[in-house]
Amino acid sequence: MRPDPADPSAALPFYRMVLGEFAARVHRDLAPTRMWGFNNLSPGPVMEVRSGKGVLVEWANQLPQRHLFTIDHNLMGAESDKPDVRSVVHLHGAKAPPESDGYPESWFVGGKSSICHYPNQQDACLLWYHDHAMGINRLNIYAGLLGLYIIRDGAEDALGLPGGAYEIPLVLFDRKFTVDGQLEYGVSPDPAAPWVPEFYGNAVLANGKLFPYLDVQPALYRFRVLNGSNSQFYNLSLSNGQLIAQIGTDQGLLPAPIAAKAVLLAPGERADLAIDFSGSAGEELTLRIGPVEEIMQFRVGRGAAKKVPMPEKLREVVPIAESAAVRTRLLTLNEYKSPKGDSMTMLLGGAHWNAPVTESPILNTVEIWSLINLTEDVHPIHLHLVRFQILDRRTFDKLHYFVKGELKFIGPAMPPDPGERGWKDTVRAHPQMVTRIIARFEGYPGRYVWHCHILEHEDNEMMRPFEVVEGASG
Ligand code: C2O
Ligand code: CU
Ligand code: CU
């Protein structure tokens, strides 16, 4: 994506992103698929910016009057008095002022636009922009409203990691296709309440394509990977069993590369991966999720192998001391089921979206958030504005918690996985475990949100506001 050259006097580079409907081919054997995206692309164009150099982005809604999918008007914020088609864009992982953060209720309709200021005062990392409209977020992102945003900085440049044609942005998401190549989204058996608690497709797309291939040289490549799916987790591996080097996570580089057979990504999480094709000249490899399912192919050229050394140290990640925390919050993840056992809603801290704000960290202070998962699922929990570190995960006695309302641990505290020992903005909260994260609430005072990044959960109240305040704490 290039900034708009029209106005050289503008104080900041200005980008215009148009949200619209179009048809695109996901595979040569499929008819064009009607979808939504940015500037007629889904995933949208990659934005590339420098740390410390702010930009302005105009998000212009030119979506049609009708939604592609069935709206559940029972959901908070999607009542029938709200327009079906509306959007607001959030830059996931950005330290942005509240008015530019894409608050879920700040949606706007077709013909309107909103200009956001992204200061980019943060370390090099891979962010992503996506729709965040209250109650229909899962449908808008599923329709195609997502894209990547890369922040670069000098410390990263100095490492000489693979760049240019050797750096590949890679967005993964699953979609359900009809035989005539159109997108289908699930509905429950009850037409009066169409929401489904999770949704999985029948195809996984890589950069919006089904089973694509990439010609590569026998050399080292860098892949900037996003799991942009609604509900699906991916465990990425290579068909030849070769190790993948993970060099970064959500909010930037890890202290040192980690060699892994497989890399797990929950919805919303990112991984910075280095794959060395230098030993595979003339071969074909595939990228897989799980043991068999193939996503894309790498066709490695026959040229002379290029050996590029991988830096041993990447970027220091200074741990935030637990003693720096001024407050620890105990926050439950709850699921409520109907008498038949169907999931009805999921909440954070037992509170609905509309309940008064209960999390009001003081600007520039450190807090520990203990996520007490009382459900049977893994929930990828995301906080806007801040980056955090994972302290640990620990199994607790759920029954004891329900009966006595107190935490009784029944296992040792487990450190984060090696690939999670960097700055994160989305964390997998495992069932029956307390997952502790630590964050400094820096940036801007104001209203933000935190939520589960399984979009079906988020749309059905697994999202809460939080407010960064100057002065007194709440
Ligand atoms: Cu991916 Cu609220 O964000
Ligand atoms: Cu976000
Ligand atoms: Cu969830």
Image (cartoon, rainbow, N blue to C red):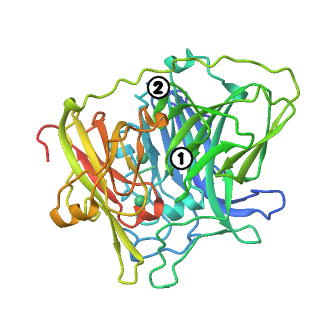
Query: Which residue appears at 44% of the width and 60% of the height?
Result: 133
- Residue type at the position of mark 2: Ser
- Residue type at the position of mark 1: Leu
From this view, report whether residue 49 is shown above or below residue 395: above
Q: Is residue 245 left or right of residue 350?
A: right
Query: Which residue appears at 75% of the width and 25% of the height?
Result: 219
Image quadrant in which you'd find residue 183:
bottom right
Q: Nearer the viewer, residue 420 or 177?
A: 420
Q: CA distance from mark 1 to mark 2?
A: 25 Å
Per the image, the residue denoted by label 1 is 265
Q: Nearer the viewer, residue 21 or 252?
A: 252
Query: Which residue appears at 76% of the width and 62% of the height?
Result: 32
From this view, report whether residue 220 is shown above or below residue 340: above
- SS label for mark 1: strand
Point out the residue furthest to the top here: 158
Q: Which mark is residue 51?
A: 2
Q: Whole-percent x and y of residue 56? A: 47, 37
Q: Is residue 246 left or right of residue 378?
A: right
Image quadrant in which you'd find residue 31:
bottom right
